[in-house]
Image (cartoon, rainbow, N blue to C red):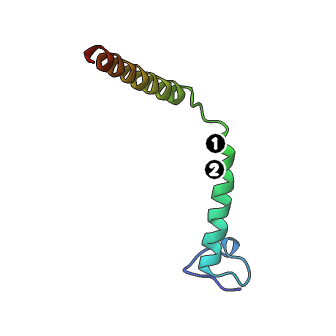
Amino acid sequence: MKVFYNLPIENVKEGENMTEKKDRNEEEKQHHDADDHHKLDLRGTFMMVMTIGGLMVLSWFAVFILFMERM
């Protein structure tokens, strides 16, 4: 069994090179990251998006009313 770059033997599988190990670690990390996404609390983000969207709609109507009054 080969040891690459002084890595412990248990971290490198038989016949696996460094690129394959990196790919395997990235896949494992993506799997763990996907599990954490359902735990995120995005209520504050949603409220800010709704607030900014509401301000945009209100400003559009204010400009539209101003335009209609000046015609």
Q: Residue furthest top?
A: 69
The residue singled out by tag 2 in the image is 33
Q: Which mark is residue 71?
A: none
For the residues labelled 1 and 2, the Cα–Cα distance comes to 7 Å
Query: Looking at the image, is 45 positioned above or below residue 69?
Result: below
Which residue is depicted at the point 69% across and 46% down? 35
User: Dot 1 surroundings within 10 Å: few (below 14), some, or many (20 or more)?
Assistant: few
Residue 2: horizontal and vertical position, in percent? 66, 86
Q: Which mark is residue 37?
A: 1
Depth order, front residue of 14/50: 50
Question: SS for tag 1?
Answer: helix
Residue 21: horizontal and vertical position, in percent? 64, 73
Horizontal arrangement in the rendering, residue 54 relative to residue 15 (left or right) = left
Query: Looking at the image, is 36 positioned above or below residue 15?
Result: above
Which residue is depicted at the point 65% across and 43% down? 36
Depth order, front residue of 68/59: 68
Quarter holding residue 8: bottom right
Quarter holding residue 23: bottom right
Residue 38: horizontal and vertical position, in percent? 67, 38
Q: Residue furthest right?
A: 14
Residue 42: horizontal and vertical position, in percent? 57, 31
Q: Amino acid at mark 2?
A: Asp
Query: Looking at the image, is 33 positioned above or below residue 52?
Result: below
Horizontal arrangement in the rendering, residue 28 relative to residue 68 (left or right) = right
Question: SS for tag 2?
Answer: helix
Q: Amino acid at mark 1?
A: His
Depth order, front residue of 8/70: 70
Q: Are marks 1 and 2 in contact (CB under 8 Å)?
A: yes
